[in-house]
Image (spheres, rainbow, N blue to C red):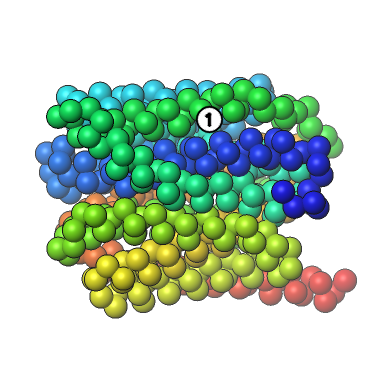
Amino acid sequence: MPTLIPSSTRGNILILALSQALMLSAIVLSMALAAILGAMLAPDKGLATLPVAAMVVGTALASLPAAMLMRRAGRRPGFLLGALLGIGGSLLCALALYRSDFVAFVLGHFLLGSYQGFANYYRFAAVEAAGTAYAGRAISLVVAGGVVAAFLGPQLGIWGRDWISGQIFVGSYLAQGALSLTALVLLSRLHLPKIASSHVGVTRSLREILAQPVLRVAIFGTAIGYAVMIMVMTATPLAILGCGLPGSDVTPVIQWHVVGMFAPSFFTGILISRYGAPRIMQAGFVLLLGHVVLALSGVEFMHFLSALIFLGVGWNFAFIGGTALLTQTYQPGERAKVQAVNEFAVFGLAATATLSAGWLYDRFGWVTLNLAVVPLLLAALIAVIAIERQFRRLATAT
């Protein structure tokens, strides 16, 4: 851990980072397998990405009750409940594959998404543990736990493929459940103050808080970055197979995409401290636009690989930059409701993007799917540039 973060908080941040790694390993495993398995189980190929969409919908819908629960009972009970949902979701997915039940497979992924809905507050808990002065680095360290997921998630999918004779990938989802069980044990050792205990001062109404241009841009930018990433990532396994490439190409593409998502986290916080969150978000959107250029340049393995790496790094800068910018817009007593609105908006839009991914790819193809994200990325880039200029004007005035 960086020495700048107080030593008294490093244990909590380590637990949160490891729990993040385990949660994301479970999610990445599903991202690598769910669309392909969905195509096998679904009555219509256009519904192939519905399990992934259900996972993102579960994340969005769980975000609000998760925030309310943790506001009343504290972070740890909420995180433990989330891990239990993850265990239940994995077991239901395994049962669904055993029975070839598409509906149960979708419901299992909804529970896995709900697990992520609770776990997405790990990064906010890290800020509370380390203090706002270390927000960028604390967020980065927790999000960096996802580097493990790049290799552990897809590899578990491969290892577990034939664990149970005659039942393809059932063992993969059982292994996924073991990840959530391990996270449950780790989180039981987490010690953070209740959110409610830190409420001090006069809080503003939600309408007044949301009136801040900086907050709106933080939410909008984070949501666009996440929605673009998840839509393209969801469709990628289908596109790889649809272009005639072997199924063995899916795993390395997803792995290196996830490395791109999380490896930069080791230095993203430092970049935010030096250049500011808006500038890092801008870099993220430029990289996401670069992904589109690479994706449209061809359909060979290296085109998919390089495009998805750009997609991952761009997401990292947009997501961590947006989260760091968000923490500047609320007072301690306002954080629970602001974080809940942010999570619901981000994952609500991501759910819409994921639901449309299978349909867009099936009806219009890989090129159209990638072109569809360009206007969104340009709008987000322009919004963040405007906020940075506002910051400069304020700095000049003072």
Whether residue 103 can be seen here:
no
Is any atom of residue 41 visible in this view? Answer: yes
Q: Foreground residue, 248 or 188?
A: 248
For label 1, the SS is helix
| Residue at the limit of the structure toward the right, as seen here | 398
Q: Which residue is at 30% across, 35% downward?
A: 160
- Residue at left offset 50%, top offset 63%: 313
Mark 1 residue crowding within 10 angstroms, few (<14) / some (14–19) / many (20+): many
Give the residue at mark 1.
Answer: 183
Q: Is residue 6 left or right of residue 100?
A: right
In this image, 303 relative to 198: left or right? left
Q: Quadrant of residue 388?
A: bottom right
The residue located at (33%, 24%) in the rendering is 91
Give amino acid for label 1.
Ala
Residue 281: % across, % down: 58, 65
Task: Name the outermost residue toward the left.
Answer: 43
Q: Is residue 235 left or right of residue 57?
A: left
Residue at horizontal 43%, vertical 74%?
A: 290
Q: Is residue 213 above or below residue 289?
A: above
Q: Foreground: 50 or 210?
A: 50
Percent position of residue 296, x then y: 29, 75
- Residue 299 lies, in percent from the top left, at 23, 71
| Spot occupied by residue 331 in the image (x, y as percentages of width and height) | 76, 44
Q: Is residue 186 above or below residue 122?
A: above
